[in-house]
Image: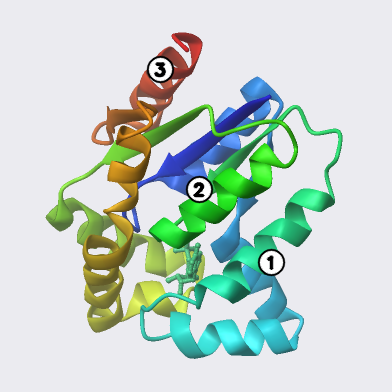
Amino acid sequence: MLNIVLFGPPGAGKGTQSALLQEKYQLKHISTGDLFRYHLSQGTELGLLAKKYSEGGGLVPDEVTINMLKEEIEKYPSAAGFIFDGFPRTTPQAEALDELLSSKSTSVSVMLALEVPEEELKTRLAGRAKVSGRADDADPKVIQNRIDTYNRETKPVKDFYANQNKLVEINGLGSIEEITDRLYKAIDAL
Ligand code: AMP
């Protein structure tokens, strides 16, 4: 199986690139942010709980997020592999993912980490707000909180994969095609 953790701060291009990678490598794309938004649109208890945390730019508690991810993976027993987008966002989530995949006799193949400077992230998110309809893209304070949350809680997850020799950093600046090409090269080199 090819299991890719597509990593990066908010606005790095994870969702855009996941869609392209999913098609080329025939992988199942799982975005925990999309799953939370779907639950919210359906008015489920999980959606309402997630909203409490995500609207301020913080993280949904690990236990809730990990359980949701497990359930999602179970839906695709014959997948050729997964692209994890927006997960793991904490070290306990990374540990849980290792455990889960190892129970299925597989593992994370690589973490591809998109590197984008903070000023560029803010510009991109403000631009995206006009089309995404996401409340958390529209408020500069929430954007700053999401970036701070990333730096504080999520960035250390890179070390987790670096320690397993699975971290590949990718320059996330340039055109969508240029970045896709860098990702393809990194995957094809595995
Ligand atoms: P995203 O679409 O990946 O930017 O996620 C939107 C929001 O959903 C985040 O700001 C978090 O509040 C929440 N979220 C998404 N994925 C996770 C995760 N793996 N752990 C905790 N919270 C998450």
Of residues 2 and 97, the one nearer the viewer is: 97
Q: Earlier in the sequence, mark 1 or mark 3?
A: 1
Residue 53 in the figure: left or right of residue 36 = left
Q: Nearer the viewer, mark 2 or mark 1?
A: 1
Identified by mark 3, the residue type is Ala
Q: Position of residue 99 (x, y in %)?
A: 61, 47
Contact (Cβ within 8 Å) of mark 2 with mark 3: no
Point out residue 154 in the picture as x, y percentages from the top left corner.
Answer: 33, 59
The tag earlier along the polypeptide, 2 or 3, is 2
Determine the CA span between mark 2 and mark 1. 19 Å
Does the rendering let one see residue 87? no
Q: Is residue 147 left or right of residue 10?
A: left
Q: Which residue is mark 1?
A: 68
The numbered mark, 2 or 1, whose residue comes first in the sequence reads 2
For the N terminus, the image quarter is: top right
Q: Residue at x 40, y 25 (%)?
A: 177
Provide the residue designation for mark 2: 15
Q: Residue at x 58, y 61 (%)?
A: 32
Label 2 vs label 3: CA separation? 18 Å
Residue type, label 1: Met
Give the residue displayed 31% in from the left and 44% down from the top. 158
Disc 2 residue: CB within 8 Å of ligand 1:
yes
Q: Which residue is mark 3?
A: 186
